[in-house]
Amino acid sequence: MNTAGSNPFAPSDFERRKFRRVTRNKWIMFAFCAVLAVPLIAILVDIFIKAAPVLSLHYLWDNPVNKGKAGGLWAPLLGTFYLVIGSLIFVAPIGILAAIYLNEYAKEGWLNRTIGIAVTSLAGVPSIVHGLFGLGAFVLTMLPVINRVVADPNDSETKWEGGLFTASLTIAVMNLPVIITSAREALGAVPQAFREACWNLGATRWQTIRTIVLPNSFSGILTGIILTISRAAGETAPILFTGATFFKWVADSGWEKLFPYNIREPFMAMSMHLNIISTQISQMPDRMKYGCAAVLITLILFVNSFAIVLRVWLRGRKRW
Amino acid sequence: MERSEKNSGAVRRVETGVTPAGSPEKRDARLGDLIPGGGTAAAPKPSRKKFNFFDATEKPTEWLIRLCGWSSIIGIVAIFVFILKEAAPMLPRLNWGYFFTSPRWIPNPGEGNAPSFGALALLVGTFSTTFICLIIAVPVGLGAAVYISEFAKGKVKETLKIVIELLAAIPSIVWGFIGLMVIGPLLQSIFTAAPGSWWGHVMVTLHLASAETGAAQGTNLLTGGVILALMSVPVIVSLSEDALRAVPDSFREAALALGANPWETVRRVLFPAARNGLLAACLLGMGRAIGETMAVLLATGHNLRIPQALTDPVRTITATIAAEMGETVNGGPHYRMLFVLGIVLFIITCGINVASDLIVKGVKKANQA
């Protein structure tokens, strides 16, 4: 009686068709994800294979020779490092305080709304427009003022030019929305009950923020700072006209090798180096281009994986 | 400090019920240390609060915080003002009709000729690469977002999210390098075919290779569009995923109760419910594609003309600014025109951002009502 043909629970053709459609669409969407992941990994592997002949510790420790056709990447690497530090000095305090204002002080209203729109607009401003802004505001407007105050008109050595200082400021403005958004998210994750408990003990608003809110959101803010670092290290367009240069002499040994750049002079950076050697220099050996790209990718992915690990660890030890 | 004095009484009442571990004096001293202005009634002399730099400077700090809160407004206004300031001398003299309709961008003509500033070719370059980017990135991005948010589970989901995040982290100069050195030559070798062969016929019919030589160029509109798509997909995926996650679970449960299968739930329930969020995600992806500089500078071939075919090299607004700013004279007409292009870009991207913000805010209001 209960044979397979007359099973009352067997799916009808209509149901079977529907089920097949679900399975098919699911696979199509998975294919979309694969379309993102597989070529990316293939391209990265390709870059690393072609870069393999030059990759070594010497490649990182030596200075570029003969317009980057030989030698290593020490000078641009160090320039990127200083650029990141310089921009963090400006953007980290301002961004975190701005996030504190938005999350702890601001009341709902037109001002808060305007600030929100300003943050999203700032995040959407193209990087090249940031570069134009840096050129117009810092290099052409701020530096003449500084020069009038500090520089000796008879001594061109003391003159400030577009360099680490202006490029750091430009990158800082560019990273402001990134750090505000992530720090605000981290502050918002601290339960309101923590703050109320602290207020009930008689603490003022600033005491509460300082002793309760900030320590509890520290790791989240750190994640935001790490993302800022990776963005500052990779950007090219904002530093094109605000201080990065393709060649700056850097000592090959001694203490000067570690501190070659003055904040008022142009500097070399990884992204700028990659840009120039892959487009402007003729007869550049391919392995040098791939090597530079591989080092930059490794640097960025290393910094970013820090952020990912930190976030996973944070989620694991969350107590509320 | 007024607040703490007011509250210390309440704290004291609570504390008197607790048996102290040490002697009364010791306990009082401890309480006095912990609670500003605290101490029990029995204490002869409440210990004085130590001077704390952070507490003493509370008012100035609050003003500093307020000032920093306005920093983003200051930043966006400063960007606009300074770019406008550099472009200003050019604005009244500029023939806007010519600027938007002529493809002749000749900033440095030969002796005796007036420079010609027609940005049509640049605008077409920007919008054609963005269009190709969106054709690829919107379906892929939405599909990936739906898969990650609704279908993937556990390890797969985590892995995909990390891949998307790393995709977003790769800097634009590296994308440009990939377009120039990897994808460009790849497309070139696929599209190039001997004239007369069947593959050559296909390619010429599709406008992918030139009819005369059968040659195709590696860095072109299509390469630029593909690279931009890879760059804007992470934006679209992460924002769409947020939008899908914001749909309440009760919607999914209701769909399930009505007998809808997962795909029907996605198409008939989640897409309409998250419509505005998904639209905003696509808009922001488009904003990123329009504003991208280094990738298109390296990957689109940088040729100033209106593209006729998918494999024609083009030139975008952003790439023009990046490539030409270095060779201009400060204060010259060419220099000012590049800032005018910057203003055009700024207005386009700001418009897109504000529009997507309003769309998302509209959703929030509708949900509250």
Image: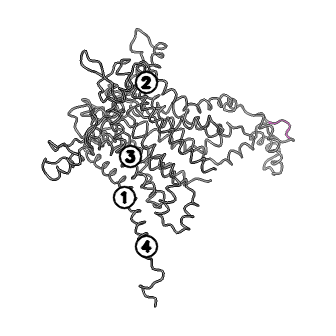
Residue at 15% x, 53% y is B198
Query: Which three-letter amino acid code belongs to the residue tagged 3?
Result: Leu
What residue would you read off at disc 1? A31
Query: Which three-letter amino acid code belongs to the residue tagged 2?
Result: Ile
Q: Nearer the viewer, residue B317 or B43?
A: B317
Frontmost of labels 4 and 2 is 4
Q: Are marks 2 and 1 on the same chain?
A: yes
Dot 1 falls on which chain?
A
Dot 4 falls on which chain?
A
Q: Are marks 3 and 1 on the same chain?
A: no
Asked which secondary structure carries label 4, the reply is helix
Please give the label number shown on residue A125: none
Asked which secondary structure carries label 2, the reply is loop
Q: What stretch of residues is rendered in magenta? A: B42-46
What residue would you read off at disc 3? B134
Q: Nearer the viewer, residue B145 or B304?
A: B304
Quote the CA–CA distance across marks 1 and 4.
26 Å
Quote the CA–CA distance across marks 3 and 1.
18 Å
Frontmost of labels 1 and 4 is 4
Asked which secondary structure carries label 1, the reply is helix
What residue would you read off at disc 4? A14
Asked which secondary structure carries label 3, the reply is helix
Please give the label number shown on residue A263: 2
